[in-house]
Image (cartoon, rainbow, N blue to C red):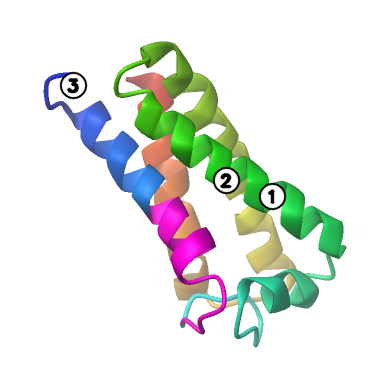
Amino acid sequence: MPSLSVSVILQVVVALGLLNVWLVRARSSTSYRGGDAQSLKEEFQAYGLPMWLFYVVGALKIGAAIALLVGLWVPALVRPAAGVVAVLMVGALAMHIKVSDPWMKALPAFLMLLMSGAIVLL
């Protein structure tokens, strides 16, 4: 395992955050869900997105999270995975804006964008 650095800490935080949202809390209500959604699927519906995109985004986020964790041993995976997360977070922020969510609902996506951007730059 690599030495502990800011980049490594961010990798783990971003990866575990994505896995938590998509695998542990996907069916749970949180105060950060877009619109009035009570689950991830409902959130995509609130944004007016097709259901197939739910599965594509989920696969990309889970895949990127796994790549960030594997990147602890295979560093070549880190920047591409963090870049994917950053792009997806820009999309998430756009969806929060689309449905006129208050700023606080978009805060997790904004923080994930900052962290994944930092990983790419570090």
Q: Give the SS element for disc 3.
A: loop
The type of residue carrying mark 3 is Met
Q: Quadrant of residue 76?
A: top left
Of the numbered discs 3 and 2, the one sitting upstream in the chain is: 3
Q: Quadrant of residue 5?
A: top left
Q: Label 2 sits on what residue type?
A: Lys
Question: In this rendering, which labeled residue sits more in front, label 3 or label 1?
Answer: 3
Please report the residue visible at 87 percent of the width from the left and 63 percent of the height from the top. Answer: 50
Q: Residue at label 3? A: 1
Closer mark to the observer between disc 3 and disc 2: 3
Q: CA distance from mark 3 to mark 2?
A: 23 Å
Label 3 or label 1, whichever comes before in sequence order = 3
Calculate the distance from the C-alpha at mark 2 to the C-alpha at mark 1.
Answer: 6 Å
Up-down: is 61 above or below 2?
A: below
Mark number displayed over residue 61? 2
Outermost residue, left direction?
A: 3
Magenta region, residue range: 17-30
Q: Which residue is mark 1?
A: 57
> Are the residues at dot 2 and dot 1 in contact (C-beta closer than 8 Å)?
yes
Q: Secondary structure at mark 1?
A: helix
Rendered location of residue 102, percent (x, y): 54, 78
